[in-house]
Amino acid sequence: MTSQRRTLVAAILGLGVTTLDETVVFVALPAMERDLGFGLLGQQWIVNAYLLPLAALLLLGGSLGDRYGRRRLFRTGLLTFGGASLAAGLAPAAAALFAARAVQGIGAAMLMPATLALVTSTFADEERGGAIGSWAAWGGAAAAIGPLVAGVAIDVLSWRWIFVLPIPLVAAALALSRGIEESRDERVEGQPLDVWGAALAAVALGALSFVVLQGPTTGWTSLSLSTGIVIAVAGLAGFLVRERRATQPLLPLELFASRNFSAGNATTLAIYAVFNGNFFILSIYLQTVLDYSALQAGAATLPVTLLMIALSSRIGRASQRIGVRAPMTAGPVVAAVGLAWLAYLEPTDPYWTGVLPGVVLFGVGLATTVAPLTTAVMTAVPEHRAGVASGANNDVARTGGLIGVALMGLAFGVTFRAHLPPAGPEGRPDNQVVASARDRPTSALEGLPADGPDDVVADLRAASVSGYRTAMAAGAALATIGGLIAFAGVRNRPDDSDT
């Protein structure tokens, strides 16, 4: 195996385990909830306990790789991620699982930017588009195959195995990384780290997550929510001021002078918010409303994986000939059409006419978008800024996922509660059912009394359908906005992106 191919395979494995872990939990959430009992809010935090430290520390991870060696950080991230994965699989309670997921996020923050930076620094300009396309295709495929892996593991073994199964991939990536040549940015080697910038980013993202996730529970006018909003705004403002003044900032703001870098990252934010947020809702909806098993729910999204594998690398190479603007514009719009189709999915619809067409359209749109998007961002900056640019783009993607899970969960929960039936006369058994559903919307059909009123069950199911449709419609709108941003902001030639 050549040095280039070894680097590419190791980078794909490293990216694969981190993106796999983002989506592998989606199908497992109902099983985790039944076992550990933490409701809708807990299910959102299972996802965001991983995404929050990942998003908050990605920029720091890219900066560490540029200074101390991308190969070194790649290996450190693999070891951290692998150890935390084992801890998550053995977690005895919800708090321990949240903690292990957070450490996984820390490991992924070191690992993820190193993967793209290694690929970018290893391949020459004329080969870079195809290499990035392969990296994006298999990384995206890992994210999309997560629900299928989880479904098999849950139905055959237990939800705990979804955290154990990636460990052999971690071991393989570690073995391959021994032959990777070290690379770093000599211009920043030995320079102080922007620790304050990392801390302010973490504060802003943490407060934002708290506000969006806790709002429906505590009330939007509560003191805790108002405080969270103030902290989020202050943290973001402080981060921007710090990055402008720091001698070696985590995120050099001058990078955003490039139109391709700015528009590419804005499109990234939208498309990953849709991918994470809507797959989160779809996976739960298939199991709780359409009565899919975990394996069936995982297999339902398998076409996305196959399309990512089949198309992304080819589209990455094609975008070098035709430019990145057209696929970056068309891809999100096609994905939006797929979500719009899925929004009208009825509980009685068969898979082949209800789920499959929407999933295929979404997969085609995602495959059309990801490789050109990554190429546009990475070719908009000098090669010595590869680590920072990679960290920034991955950070935007993870932040998009963090926000997407929160927003789509919010859209589902608010609409679900608004469509619940009013309480009946005092003492009626269905009052307890409705009250429980208000607290735990995604578990609305669990725990119903065997002799529960049929009309209450029907109302709960109808409320779930309404919440699901609102979330899918929100995702379709956001994906369309991402395509419009690419159309307006992206230029085909990197040297035109600053004009």
Image (spheres, rainbow, N blue to C red):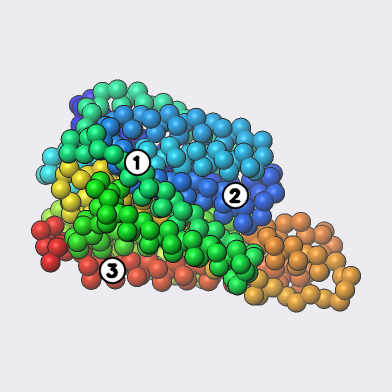
Quote the CA–CA distance across marks 1 and 3.
28 Å
- Crowding at dot 3, Cα within 10 Å, few <14 / some 14-19 / many 20+, comes out as many
Q: Secondary structure at mark 1?
A: helix
Relative to 186, residue 492 above or below: below
Residue drawn at 56 percent across, 54 percent down:
44
In the rendered image, residue 348, in percent from the top left (x then y), is placed at 61, 66
What kind of residue is marked 2? Leu
Q: Is residue 299 left or right of residue 2?
A: right
Q: Secondary structure at mark 3?
A: helix
Query: Which mark is nearer the camera, 2 or 1?
Result: 1
Give the labeled residue for mark 3: 485
Q: Quadrant of residue 275?
A: bottom left
Quote the CA–CA distance across marks 2 and 1.
29 Å
Query: Which mark is nearer the camera, 1 or 3?
Result: 1
Relative to 42, residue 418 above or below: below
Residue drawn at 31 percent across, 37 percent down:
64
What kind of residue is marked 1? Gly
Give the labeled residue for mark 1: 61
Relative to 270, residue 19 above or below: above
Q: Earlier in the sequence, mark 1 or mark 3?
A: 1
- Quarter the N terminus occupies: top left
Q: Earlier in the sequence, mark 2 or mark 3?
A: 2
Residue drawn at 76 percent across, 56 percent down:
447
Q: Earlier in the sequence, mark 2 or mark 1?
A: 2
What kind of residue is marked 3? Ile
On residue 29, the disc is: 2
Q: Is residue 109 left or right of residue 342?
A: left
The residue lying toward the viewer, choosing from 437 and 142, is 437
- Crowding at dot 2, Cα within 10 Å, few <14 / some 14-19 / many 20+, comes out as many
